């Protein structure tokens, strides 16, 4: 019978990294919509506050993930999750139009995943 910790470890890594990326995306880009009329330093402090939450999920995610994956695999997984979080954020939160370039970028990342995870 498979060890449940071998299943839940990678899942918790992906879940924590997804949460981390939600906070990271807001820290990096939400100020463009919400704080555009404020001085840049207000946006910096607001982004740092959000980024602190991002790191609270990202650090444990990578510690868990490193038990199962190589450093390169951790990084490419993070990039896939970043695009997965960014596209809905750009479309639904920022009001950007959908572009087929998102699909092409995703396909390129799938190629990167292949090379990072092949035996």
Image (spheres, rainbow, N blue to C red):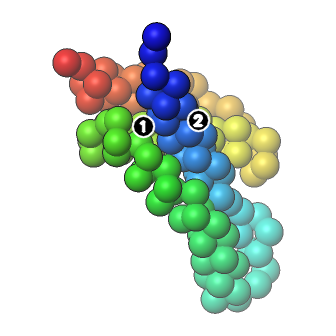
Residue depicted at x 68% and y 45%: 90
Specify whether residue 25 is in view.
no
Q: Nearer the viewer, residue 17 or 36?
A: 17
Residue depicted at x 26% and y 39%: 70
Against 6, residue 13 (above or below) is below
Residue wearing tag 1: 77
Secondary structure beneath label 1: helix
* Mark 1 and mark 2 residues within 8 Å of each other at the beta carbon: no
Instruction: Report the residue that reaches farthest toward the front.
Output: 1
107 left or right of 92 in image: left
Which quadrant: the C terminus? top left
52 left or right of 46 in image: left
N-terminal of the two: label 1 or label 2?
1
The percent coordinates of residue 8 (x first, y second) are: 54, 31
Against 111, residue 34 (above or below) is below
Against 27, residue 63 (above or below) is above
58 left or right of 72 in image: right
Residue wearing tag 2: 84
Secondary structure beneath label 2: helix
Specify whether residue 48 is in view.
yes
The percent coordinates of residue 116 (x first, y second) are: 26, 29
Pair 1/2: label in front? 1
Q: Residues within 10 Å of mark 2 (few under 14, many from 20)?
A: some
The tag on residue 92 is none
Instruction: Report the residue that reaches farthest toward the top.
Output: 1
User: How many marks do you count on the picture?
Assistant: 2
From mark 1 to mark 2, how far is it between C-alphas?
11 Å
The percent coordinates of residue 21 (x first, y second) are: 58, 51
Residue depicted at x 65% and y 58%: 23
Residue depicted at x 44% and y 28%: 6
Q: Nearer the viewer, residue 36 or 80?
A: 80
């Amino acid at each position: 019978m498979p060890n449940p910790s071998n299943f839940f470890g990678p899942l918790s890594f992906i879940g924590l990294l997804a949460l981390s990326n939600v906070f990271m995306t807001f820290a990096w880009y939400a100020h463009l919509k919400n704080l555009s009329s404020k001085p840049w330093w207000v946006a910096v402090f607001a982004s740092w506050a959000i980024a602190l939450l991002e790191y609270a999920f990202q650090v444990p995610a990578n510690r868990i993930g490193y038990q199962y994956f190589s450093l390169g695999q951790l990084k490419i997984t993070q990039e896939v999750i970043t695009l997965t979080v960014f596209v809905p954020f750009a479309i639904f939160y920022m009001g950007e139009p959908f572009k087929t370039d998102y699909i092409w970028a995703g396909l390129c990342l799938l190629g990167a995943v292949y090379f990072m995870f092949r035996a």
